[in-house]
Image (cartoon, grey):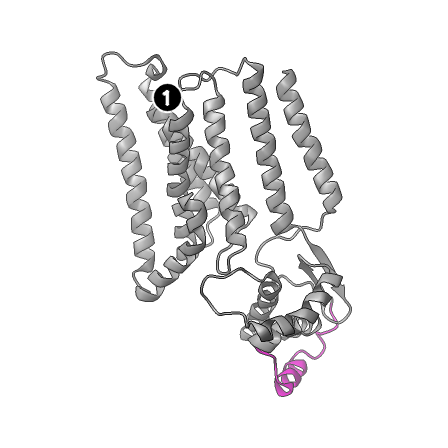
Amino acid sequence: MLILFGSPYVGQLRSSLRSSFPEEYPWIIGGVTATAVVGAIGWAVVHLRQSRYDSSPAPSARQPLWVRYTLIITAVAVSAGYARAVSTGESEVDLVEAFHFVEYGLVAYLFYRAWRRRSDVSGVALAAGAGLALGIADEWVQWFVPGRVGEMHDILLNAVAVGCGLLVSIAVHPPASLALPMRRASRLALGAAASGLLLAFAGFVDCVHLGYEIQDGKAGAFRSRYDMTALAAAAANRPARWKASPPPVGGFRHEDHYLSEGEWHVQRRTIAVGTRDWRTALREDAILERFYAPVLEIRGRWSEEQRSEFERNAHGLEQAAYRSDAAPYPIYVINRKAFWTVTLLIAAAVVWLASRV
C-alpha cells in the first residue's frame, strides 16, 4: 500500500533531491541502491552459512547448499544482465530503474514469506502474481500523475525484479513444497489469479498503449491516444477549461493527457530546432497548430518571423513524407474489440484448463 499510494509523490521527492543536491543526486540514488543490494546479498549468504549448523533443519530446507547459492548467483546475474540490456546511458534514469530491483525484490520476499508454507507450488505462484499485480497497479497509478511515466517497459522491469527477489527468497527460505496442486480448488484459485492478472495487464495496455494513427495532409502522420473526433473536441473545450482553471506547472495533480501529448510535440519541435532539423520542426509545429492549438497558447507559439525563417531553411525538404516520433512510449494501433475478445477468450481458457487438468 505504501508503494502504490506513495508512488505519485516519489517523483516530487526525487525532484527535491535533484534540485537540492544536483551534483550529489546520482551518488545518493546509486549509494542507496548499492547499499540495499549488497546488504540483501550479505544477509542471504550469512543465513545460508548459519543453516549449515542447524542440527534439525526443516524438510524443506534440506537442499544442497550449492543449489541455494546457485539461485542467489542466478538472481544477481539476471538482474545485472537485464539492467545492462535496457540501459539508456543516462545515469539518473538507469539508477532509478536499478532501484526497482531493490523495491520489488523486497515486495517479492514479503509476499513469499506470507505464502511459502502452502502445501504445493501455489505459494511461489501466488507470491509472483501478487508482486506483478502490484507492479501493474503501481505503473497504472503513475500514468495519471504528471512527471511520472507508467508504461509496459516498467511493468516488465518490475516482473524481472519480482522474479529475482523470488529466487533469493527460495534460496534463503526454501518452500514447504514445489509439488503441483492436486486439489481442484487450489488449481481453480491459481487459474483465477492468472486470469485476473492477465485482465489487469490488458486493462493497463488498453489505457496506456492503445491509440490511433492520425494522418494529415499538411502535418504528416503521428500516433495519439485520441482519434480525430476526440482531438477536435479536446481542442474546442480546453481553452474554456484552462481559462477557468489554468494548468499548474509542477506539483501534484491529475494529468491532462491531451496537454501531455501536446507537450510531446512541443518538446520534439524544440529538439529539432536545436539540431537545425528544420523539416521536423515545421512538421511538429503543423501538428501542434492543427491538433493542439490550445497547448501552444500556454506553452509558446512561433512568431511569423520565426516560421518564415524556418520555412526558408527547410526549402525543398518540406514535401517529403513525415511520421512523428514525438511519443515517448509505444502507442499501438489495434482494434479494441478484437484485443478484448482475444484477451477474454485466453482468460476463460486459463480458468477452464485449471479446472480440467
202 left or right of 157?
right
Quarter of the figure with the N terminus: top left
186 left or right of 240?
left
Give the residue displayed 56% in from the left and 24% down from the top: 189
Quarter of the figure with the C terminus: top right
User: For residue 25, what is the image quadrant?
Assistant: bottom left
Q: Is residue 258 above or below residue 304?
A: above
Q: Is residue 154 above or below residue 169?
A: below
Q: Which residue is mark 1?
A: 174
Q: Is residue 305 above or below residue 37?
A: below
* Mark 1: amino acid: Pro
Residue lying farthest bottom?
305
Q: Is residue 151 visible?
A: yes
Residue 57, percent from left and from top: 28, 14
25 left or right of 198?
left
The magenta-colored residue range is: 300-320
Residue lying farthest right?
217
Residue 17, percent from left and from top: 33, 61
Give the residue displayed 37% in from the left and 58% down from the top: 13
Q: Nearer the viewer, residue 323 or 101?
A: 101
Number of marks: 1
Residue 331, percent from left and from top: 64, 53
Q: Secondary structure at mark 1?
A: loop
Mark 1, Cα crowd under 10 Å, few <14 / some 14-19 / many 20+, is many
Residue 308 part of the magenta-drawn span: yes
Give the residue displayed 44% in from the left and 19% down from the top: 118
Give the residue displayed 34% in from the left and 57% down from the top: 26
